[in-house]
Image (cartoon, rainbow, N blue to C red):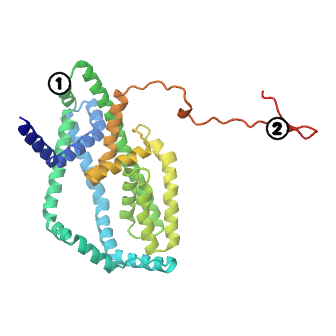
Amino acid sequence: MCVITVFIAIFAWNALGSLTTLGIYLLLSFFLSLALEPIVLRLVKRKWKRGAAAAVALIGFLIFSIVVMALFGQLLVQQIIEFAKQAPTYWENLREMVTERFNFEIPATNDLIAQAMERWGDDVTSGALAVGSGIVSVIFATLTILLVTFYLLAAGPKFRATICAFLSPEHQAEMLRVWEITQDKVSGFISSRLILALVSSLATFAFLTILKTPYSVPLALFTGLISQFVPTIGTYIGGALPVVVALAGQGWPQALAILIFIVAYQQVENLWLQPKISAKALEMNPAVAFIVVIGFGSVFGPIGAFLGLPIAAVIQAALSTYLRRHELIESDLLHDPRHTQPVAVRTSESGESAEDDRQ
């Protein structure tokens, strides 16, 4: 029995490892269904059938995505290709400027390419051969996510009823409460992040266009997405690339202007935009959000980093429901030191000091 148990455990562990990709697809479908659920509910309240409402919401999302890609996709691809062609020139300009001003030697472009080919040459070759299979995998993944999302949206209450049928009435109430909180907070969280990313991309694009910085479209999209889905330092990571491109292609005045814009926009977003747009979203400590993104990104790659914050939002919503909060005891460690008024001192005629009486 021990030997059989060990073999079953090994098989289960290997099976779970093989199903990691499928699990990511299911998570993406789940969060997409949460984001589209408010639209479905609005249509159902207007006497639409659940299946038709789910289909319209999903098709509308697809049309919106296709329109966005059609408007910016061709220009984005063209600018990315042109940027890739001009990247060696920008690198050499930056290298010469750093060498002249700081007396610091940066490797030349040919040396970097030689090192990259030596280290990753085999991977590049095998990756080029796998492009065809990669395209097929992307199409299959997209269809899988859309199909599961449609089923989750179309099922709706039936899916929740199926889960509740295996629970006692007390646990059913808790599960539905957690589901409601998760639905409200996560859908607000995802929609607010997408809106903030769009606003950030448009503002950055407008500023880069005014400065006539090349490749403004891909740089603006990169800045907008990174700033919203990498918390705390995402804005500065996303803004670093436009600063470097402006420094190499235009000069330090434009680079400094972009840096000032990035810092100023971050303050406007933190103080005005985010409180307005994210009023109903689930907020979390910036340090916790940053650790979650780094952790999920390390384990599951870029998709894990993207899903890290929504998953953390679900966990926080569940914990806020199940964990009981107690009253805090009195302790100096739970508060900052109180501000004390300085004691006024008066000097007598003989030169001696005396403390005023406290009121």
Q: Quadrant of the N terminus?
A: top left
Amino acid type, residue under disc 1 in the picture = Phe
**In the displayed image of the protein, which residue is found farthest to the right?**
349
Q: Image check: 176 left or right of 216?
A: left
The x, y position of residue 137, in whole percent, is 15, 56
Q: Exactly how many numbered labels are in the figure? A: 2
Residue underneath mark 1: 166
Badge 2 marks a residue whose secondary structure is strand
Q: In the image shown, does 351 or 322 lie closer to the viewer? A: 351
The x, y position of residue 314, in whole percent, is 32, 37
Q: Residue at x 20, y 42 (%)?
A: 149
Residue underneath mark 2: 345
Image quadrant assignment for residue 43? top left
Height in image: 101 above or below 216?
Answer: below
Q: Residue at x 26, y 47 (%)?
A: 61
* Residue 52 seen in render: no
Q: Image check: 84 left or right of 262?
A: left
The x, y position of residue 274, in whole percent, is 46, 45
Amino acid type, residue under disc 2 in the picture = Val
**In the displayed image of the protein, which residue is found farthest to the front?**
2
Instruction: Say which label, 1 or 2, has the lower sequence index.
Output: 1
Q: Image check: 340 left or right of 169?
A: right
Height in image: 219 above or below 195?
Answer: below
The x, y position of residue 178, in whole percent, is 31, 29
Mark carried by residue 346: none
The alpha-carbon separation of the residues under discs 1 and 2 comes to 75 Å
